[in-house]
Image (cartoon, rainbow, N blue to C red):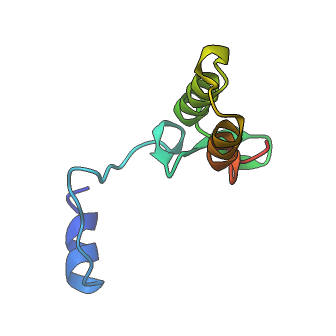
């Protein structure tokens, strides 16, 4: 890390957030909700387990039968939560 940060900051004129930046094995990194996993053809990209668990918890919260007061609002909230979620 100490060798690459000066190159990025001085040669590429980019700022590096030292708190968020890490040099680690690709299988240990979570980036924008995705993780990198070793597959048969090299590394593959899929939804990270923490992101999947967070999504499941949110859907469970929205589909709780005791919480449905207004059907249209419930339907809109659920759609907003699910739209854009990867299908794999």
* Image quadrant where one finds the C terminus: top right
Residue drawn at x 19%, y 71% as measured from the top left? 6
Residue drawn at x 70%, y 46% as measured from the top left? 79
Q: Position of residue 41 (x, y in %)?
A: 79, 48
Q: Which quadrant of the figure has residue 17? A: bottom left
Q: Which quadrant of the figure has residue 52? A: top right
Residue drawn at x 50%, y 52% as measured from the top left? 32
- The mark total stands at 0
Q: Position of residue 48 (x, y in %)?
A: 58, 37
Q: Position of residue 13 (x, y in %)?
A: 25, 84
Can residue 45 be seen at all in this image of the molecule?
no
Q: 80 or 40, which lies in front?
A: 80
**Left or right, residue 80 beside residue 7:** right
Can residue 67 be seen at all in this image of the molecule?
yes
**Left or right, residue 75 beside residue 23:** right
Q: Position of residue 31 (x, y in %)?
A: 49, 50
* Image quadrant where one finds the N terminus: bottom left
Which residue in the rendered view is the most extreme toward the front?
70
């Amino acid at each position: 890390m100490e060798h690459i940060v000066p190159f990025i900051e001085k040669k590429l004129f980019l700022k590096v957030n030292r708190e968020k930046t890490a040099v680690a094995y690709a299988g240990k990194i979570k980036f924008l909700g995705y993780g990198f996993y070793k597959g048969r053809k090299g590394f593959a990209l899929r939804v990270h387990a923490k992101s999947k668990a967070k999504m499941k918890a949110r859907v469970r919260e929205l589909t709780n039968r005791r919480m449905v007061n207004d059907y249209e609002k419930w339907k809109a909230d659920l759609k907003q939560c699910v739209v854009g979620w990867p299908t794999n």
